[in-house]
Image (spheres, helix red, strand yellow):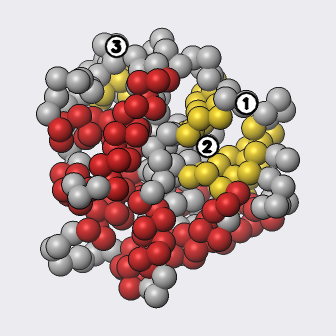
């Protein structure tokens, strides 16, 4: 059995299928990790969701910021405009099934045998693993209860800049979501700098890539995506797999375990 991790697909269905063929993925024997952002921009988000759902028994996927935006769009009572790709999912006969499945995906996945964590964007340097798991579960529980729609409607915003138990209900969850699905840069005190989106070195207000700060989960390798300007990256006990498929660059897969190996196919919008 081989465990493969794949970077941000973002609706690039053709590239996803080509990559599965290239790694000779066998759902009966292998495991697939997806770093989130299954949907949006690539043109065939519905087909991507259908394929991942079909592979669900051999696939682990965490939520990305684009996935959460889609969930928020689906819950919105306002008139939805401007995103026909996501509307196409909502209008599909199996749209609700796919939506319900996506809503149940976690923010954090841990594999002790591989000593790997998977998140979409990152993990706060000052969070140890028990705290990170607790906070991820806190958001997941809310997404499944009667306040889930409220959270999705109000999750947007760059404040607060860090999580604290002293924050109110909404602020806590927004801070958690921002860490797991939006973070790229942190200031030296561990607070988030969310306005910078460029490559390392472009951080503002003295911020640096989150993985360059001392990390309490440093005994695990963190597998993540989200940062196409960083691209395929290995170092600091982290691996970024967002190689910009939706921007016409590459979609990347990597085998996890003792021998890391990567495969790539050309990314494209369908």
| Residue 113 numbered mark, or none | 1
* Secondary structure beneath label 2: loop
Of labels 1 and 2, the one closer to you = 1
Nearest to N terminus: mark 1 or mark 2: 1
* Secondary structure beneath label 1: loop
Classify residue 148 by image quadrant. Answer: bottom left
> Which residue lies at the image location 47% right of the left edge and 47% below the top edge?
106
Nearest to N terminus: mark 3 or mark 1: 1
Of labels 3 and 1, the one closer to you = 1
Name the residue that disc number 3 marks. 188
Name the residue that disc number 2 marks. 241
| Left or right relative to 61: residue 55 | right
Horizontal and vertical percent position of residue 262: 77, 43
Viewer-proximal residue among 101 and 182: 101
Give the Cα distance between marks 3 and 1: 32 Å
| Left or right relative to 263: residue 56 | left
Classify residue 103 by image quadrant. Answer: bottom left
Horizontal and vertical percent position of residue 253: 71, 49
Please indicate, yes or no, whether residue 39 appears anywhere in the rendered image.
no
Give the Cα distance between marks 1 and 2: 21 Å
């Amino acid at each position: 059995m081989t465990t493969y991790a794949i970077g941000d697909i973002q609706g690039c269905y053709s590239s996803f299928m080509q990559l599965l063929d290239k790694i000779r993925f066998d759902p009966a024997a292998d495991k697939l990790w997806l770093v989130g952002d299954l949907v949006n921009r690539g043109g065939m988000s519905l087909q991507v969701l259908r394929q991942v759902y079909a592979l669900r028994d051999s696939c682990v996927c965490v939520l990305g910021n684009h996935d959460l935006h889609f969930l928020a769009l689906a819950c919105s009572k306002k008139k939805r405009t401007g995103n026909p790709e996501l509307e196409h999912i909502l209008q599909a006969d199996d749209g609700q099934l796919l939506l319900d499945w996506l809503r149940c995906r976690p923010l954090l996945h841990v594999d002790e045998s591989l000593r790997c964590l998977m998140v979409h964007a990152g993990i706060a340097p000052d969070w140890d693993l028990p705290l990170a798991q607790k906070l991820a579960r806190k958001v997941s529980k809310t997404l499944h209860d009667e306040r889930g729609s409220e959270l999705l409607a109000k999750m947007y915003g760059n404040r607060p800049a860090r999580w604290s138990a002293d924050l109110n209900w909404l602020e806590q969850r927004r801070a958690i979501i921002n860490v797991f699905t939006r973070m790229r840069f942190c200031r030296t005190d561990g607070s988030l700098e969310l306005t910078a989106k460029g490559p390392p070195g472009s951080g503002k207000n003295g911020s640096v890539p989150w993985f360059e700060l001392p990390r309490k989960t440093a005994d695990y390798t963190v597998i993540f995506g989200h940062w196409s300007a960083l691209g395929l990256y290995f170092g600091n006990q982290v691996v970024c797999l967002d190689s910009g498929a939706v921007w016409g660059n590459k979609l990347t897969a990597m085998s996890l375990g003792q021998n890391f190996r990567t495969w790539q196919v050309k990314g494209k919008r369908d």
